[in-house]
């Protein structure tokens, strides 16, 4: 795993005339999102910014994915292959990855997305409700009430989860946990944050604890 610029010395950029292919994989569901190319500078900038940066072969310059669309790729990990000439980048996308507006640059019809990855779909639905302020939408109504009301709901649902867990009622625990996750997604959107940031923080903590086991 490559986590700092000094570790880029292990990458054989010379083999590809200064460039190596970078495979971008969705950190949550394992889908291959796209393929780009990096030189040493792009790889270093990716580590520094914690967002994926490529080297554009057509423009002959650095190119941060999403710099115009806002559909960035948040870096989770960078890994080198056995021949030291290909990078595997695990990332969390913010919006569609492909210029066609699709999630990936490949035809992934029939790809079995994990159940947990549905949270990302739900997050997009919440964002859509916030943008449209759809009449009759509970989500839109909650967002219109403001962050304090949303925070109150998160607190209420958190308490319900705790009570269900203490009572040992499995069905109730699942139901209340679903309510909590939903309201947490709404809170993140209301405060301009995202599920990707939360997952990224958890993965960074996991990587740090794995590197220094107690």
Image: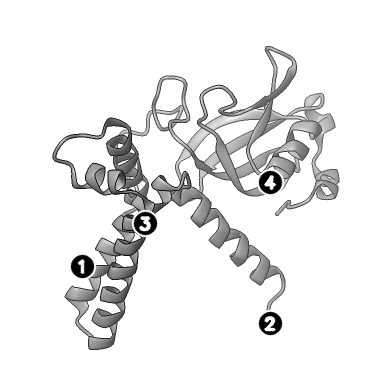
Q: Residue 148 has which mark?
A: 3
State the residue lying farthest toward the bottom.
167
Q: Residue at x 49, y 39 (%)?
A: 93
Closer mark to the observer between disc 4 and disc 1: 1
Q: Nearer the viewer, residue 15 or 193?
A: 193
In the image: residue 57, left or right of residue 200: right
Q: Earlier in the sequence, mark 4 or mark 1?
A: 4
Q: Nearer the viewer, residue 60 or 132?
A: 132
Give the CA distance from mark 4 to mark 1: 42 Å
Measure the C-alpha gap from mark 2 to mark 1.
35 Å
According to the picture, the residue beneath numbered tag 1 turns out to be 175
The CA distance from mark 3 to mark 1 is: 23 Å
* Cα–Cα span, label 2 and label 4: 29 Å
Residue that badge 4 annotates? 81
Does the residue at mark 3 contact the one at mark 2 (Cβ under 8 Å)? no
Question: Which one is closest to the eye, mark 2 or mark 1?
Answer: 1
Q: Earlier in the sequence, mark 3 or mark 1?
A: 3
Indicate the position of residue 144 as horizontal and vertical percent values. Answer: 29, 43
- Colouring mode (rainbow / by chain / secondary structure / one colour): one colour
For the residue labelled by badge 3, is the local secondary structure a helix, a strand or a loop? Answer: helix
- Helix, strand or loop at label 2? It is loop
Q: Residues within 10 Å of mark 1 (few under 14, many from 20)?
A: few
Per the model, the C-alpha gap separating discs 3 and 4 is 47 Å
Q: Is residue 98 above or below residue 125?
A: above
> First in sequence: mark 3 or mark 2?
3
Question: 92 left or right of 206?
Answer: left
Q: Nearer the viewer's eye, disc 2 or disc 4?
A: 2
Residue at figure coordinates x 76%, y 28% from the top left: 19
Q: Position of residue 85 (x, y in %)?
A: 74, 38
Badge 2 is on which residue? 214
Labelled pair 2, 4 in contact (Cβ < 8 Å): no
Disc with the residue nearer the chain's start (3 vs 4): 4
């Amino acid at each position: 795993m490559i986590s700092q610029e000094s570790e880029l010395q292990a990458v054989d950029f010379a083999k590809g005339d200064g460039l190596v292919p970078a495979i971008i994989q969705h950190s949550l569901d394992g889908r291959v999102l796209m393929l780009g190319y990096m030189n040493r500078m792009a790889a270093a900038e990716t580590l520094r910014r914690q967002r994926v940066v490529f080297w554009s072969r057509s423009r002959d310059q650095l190119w941060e994915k999403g710099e115009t669309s806002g559909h960035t790729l948040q870096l989770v990990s960078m890994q080198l292959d056995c021949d030291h000439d290909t990078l595997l980048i695990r990332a969390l996308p913010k919006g569609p990855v492909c210029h066609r507006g699709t999630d990936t640059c490949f035809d992934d019809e029939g790809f079995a997305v994990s159940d947990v990855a549905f949270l990302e779909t739900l997050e997009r639905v919440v964002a859509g409700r916030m943008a449209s302020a759809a009449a009759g939408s509970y989500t839109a109504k909650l967002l219109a009430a403001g962050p304090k009301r949303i925070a109150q709901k998160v607190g209420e649902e958190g308490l319900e989860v705790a009570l269900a867990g203490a009572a040992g009622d499995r069905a109730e625990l699942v139901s209340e946990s679903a309510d909590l996750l939903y309201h947490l997604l709404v809170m993140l959107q209301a405060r301009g944050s995202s599920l990707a940031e939360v997952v990224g923080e958890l993965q960074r903590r996991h990587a740090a604890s794995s590197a220094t086991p107690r």
